[in-house]
């Protein structure tokens, strides 16, 4: 497997329509277990905020997580959305904002969990070290992940798109 040039516009369009999947367990603090279905993060264009004070051209977009095609009820954005709907029914409103440092903590948790999962994967493949993994050791648990990573779907030889 080699590197692939990605068309940014096409990747953004695909993320907008299909979302971006990841193991919720790897993000830490989601309440998901390693065997649970992937979370699919779908960008919310209405949340777009330019961040030129951080770096010119940088922006942030919040994502709504889905599990098995349904909004994930435990997601903070979904909990907040339900709360705002209840407040609106009473004629009240709520103003909120995101804190960027929260995302840095989540990224650190994600990377730590990803390292743990990769180590478990290596051991499950009978390897003593992640550096001993071979391309044929890698499979995906969802069709989407198999297509994006260009590896076979678990239990098959099928690589979507080939």
Image (spheres, rainbow, N blue to C red):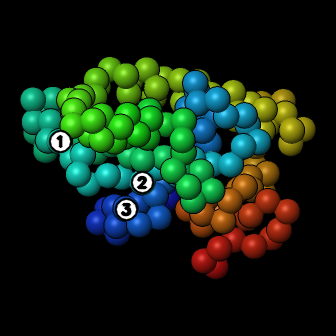
In this view, the residue in front, 139 or 65, is: 65
Disc with the residue nearer the chain's start (1 vs 2) = 2
Disc with the residue nearer the chain's start (1 vs 3) = 3
Q: Which residue is mark 1?
A: 49
Whether residue 70 is visible here, answered yes or no, is yes
Q: Identify the element where label 3 is drawn.
A: helix
Q: Identify which residue is drawn at 21% across, 32% down.
A: 92
Residue furthest to the bottom: 162
Kindly report the distance in space between the C-alpha atoms of the residues bearing marks 1 and 3: 16 Å
Quarter of the figure that contains the N terminus: bottom right
Q: Position of residue 35 (x, y in %)?
A: 76, 42
Whether residue 114 is visible here, answered yes or no, is no
Q: Identify the element where label 2 is drawn.
A: strand
Disc with the residue nearer the chain's start (3 vs 2) = 3
Q: Is residue 15 above or below residue 134?
A: below
Q: Is residue 18 above or below residue 70?
A: below
Q: Position of residue 130 (x, y in %)?
A: 73, 34
Whether residues under marks 1 and 3 lie with C-beta atoms below 8 angstroms apart, the answer is no
121 sits to left or right of 75: right
How crowded pointer 3 is (Cα within 10 Å; few <14, some 14-19, many 20+) is rated as some
In this view, the residue in front, 159 or 77, is: 77
How crowded pointer 2 is (Cα within 10 Å; few <14, some 14-19, many 20+) is rated as many
Q: Identify the element where label 1 is drawn.
A: strand
Q: Which residue is mark 3?
A: 16
Q: Which residue is mark 2?
A: 42
Q: Identify which residue is drawn at 54% across, 41% down.
A: 73
Q: Position of residue 5 (x, y in %)?
A: 40, 64
Kindly report the distance in space between the C-alpha atoms of the residues bearing marks 3 and 2: 6 Å
Q: Identify which residue is drawn at 51% across, 50% down.
A: 71
Whether residues under marks 3 and 2 lie with C-beta atoms below 8 angstroms apart, the answer is yes
């Amino acid at each position: 497997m080699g590197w692939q040039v990605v068309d940014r516009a096409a990747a953004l369009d695909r993320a907008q329509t299909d979302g971006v999947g990841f193991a919720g367990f790897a993000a830490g603090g989601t309440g998901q277990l390693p065997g649970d279905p992937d979370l699919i993060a779908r960008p919310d264009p209405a949340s777009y905020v330019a961040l030129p004070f951080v770096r010119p051209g940088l922006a942030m977009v919040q994502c709504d997580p889905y599990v098995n095609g349904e909004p994930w009820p435990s997601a903070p954005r979904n909990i907040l959305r339900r709360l705002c709907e209840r407040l609106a029914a009473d004629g009240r409103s709520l103003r909120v904002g995101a804190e960027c440092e929260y995302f840095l903590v989540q990224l650190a948790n994600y990377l730590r969990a990803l390292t743990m999962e990769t180590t478990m994967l290596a051991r499950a493949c009978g390897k003593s070290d992640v550096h001993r993994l071979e391309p044929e050791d890698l499979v995906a648990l969802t069709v989407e992940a198999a297509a994006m990573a260009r590896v076979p779907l678990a239990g098959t030889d099928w690589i979507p798109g080939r």
